[in-house]
Structure formats: C-alpha cells, structure tokens
Amino acid sequence: MKIYPSFGVAAGFFHPEDVNDYIAASLAIEGVTKQYGTTDMFANYEIHGGVTFRLKSMDFSGELAFAFAPKWIIVENGDNINFYFNRVSPGVSANYYIPMKSEKMDFFLGGGVQYHFMKFEDFKSSNPGFCLRAGVSLQFGRFNMQPNISFLYAKSKDAIEGSQYDFVMNYTSGLIGIIMSFHPPIDRN
C-alpha cells in the first residue's frame, strides 16, 4: 500500500463545433479571410496533478486537471487574433492493473468522474463528465511512468443572451498522455 503524488501531461484532438463557428464568424466580422491552414480549433493540451493511493492491483486518485486550446490567427497587414478555450477539471479516478511477464511492467484500465469548468471568450459553463483510460505502467527503480490513451467526455451549454439557442462548449476529446510518479516498486505478491 502506497500513497504518492503524481503528475502528467497529455495532448488531444477534439471538435468544439460552436467554438469553431464563433471563431469563423468573428473573423468574418473583422474582415479577415483565410489564406492557408484552418480557423478551427482541433488540438488541446492538458496538465494534471494529484494524489494516488495504490494497492497491489488497483489505485485510486484525486486529481486536478487544466486543459487549454489556443488558436492563433496570423493576420497579414493587421493585428493577429487569438482565441483560448480552457477547462479546469477536479475529479477522482481508479485504475486496475493486470500484471505482465516483466516485474517492471503492468497493463492498466481505468476511469473516473470529473466536474468540468469551461471558459471561452465571454462564455462559461460547467457540467460533470467522465474519463476512460488504458495504458502501461513502467517501473524504473523509484520512478514510475504510465504512457496511456484516454477518452474524455466534457460537454456543457451556456445561454446566449437574447437568443433561444445555447452555446455548446464541447471539450470531448481523445488524448495521448503520460502520468509520472516517484515511489518504490509495488509488491505483487
């Protein structure tokens, strides 16, 4: 049984349709025409930290994640335009470890629940969501590294003033990441 801090980074892809429509409309109002590339936001980046309680074949973590998705529009003969879509997500998760032949390697499956606080321009919303994760736990002495892939569901709405429609803030994404921690090897016996 071990208790230790963990931290990680991840990068992912998503499609926040209302956010992308807002960016396109803002550029049209400014008279900016696209020369190359895309005006859509499609990549996001996450950093997270937490405290993990590890048993032989399971762990439980309390986590706090911060994700950001920047979009920089370079304007010829004018001021550049920047947009940022951010998410702060406290949550809890659990992982189940399946031993592999090597004493230093385990496959793991896990998931958790989070509460997402999202912000884009003047829009703010929050809602519960979930995360599913799979990866490999690699132990190198006191250093543990867990490369993983995950699916994150985060979607919420904010009312648009003077409109019957809502602005949908969708941070649902697929992520590739790594979780790191420092602790002695876990005894499997």
Image (tube, grey):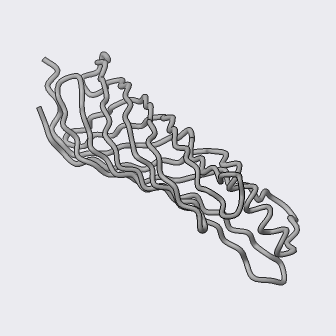
> From the viewer's perspective, is 158 left or right of 134?
right
> From the viewer's perspective, is 61 left or right of 73?
left
Q: Is residue 72 above or below residue 187?
A: below
> Which is nearer the eye, 138 or 17?
17
> Which is nearer the eye, 130 or 43?
130
**Residue 99 spot, x, y in % from top left:** 28, 18
**Residue 178 spot, x, y in % from top left:** 41, 43
> Which is nearer the eye, 158 or 82?
158
Count up the numbered dots: 0
Q: Is residue 142 above or below residue 37?
A: above
Where, by quadrant of the figure, is residue 139 drawn?
top left
Q: Residue at x 34, y 51 (%)?
A: 64
> From the viewer's perspective, is 2 left or right of 23?
left
Q: Quadrant of the C terminus?
A: top left
Q: Quadrant of the N terminus?
A: top left
Q: Residue at x 58, y 50 (%)?
A: 157
Where, by quadrant of the figure, is residue 179 drawn?
top left
Q: Is residue 144 above or below residue 44?
A: above
Q: Is residue 31 above or below residue 101?
A: below
Q: Residue at x 15, y 38 (%)?
A: 184
**Residue 123 spot, x, y in % from top left:** 58, 62
Q: Residue at x 37, y 34 (%)?
A: 112
**Residue 62 spot, x, y in % from top left:** 27, 44
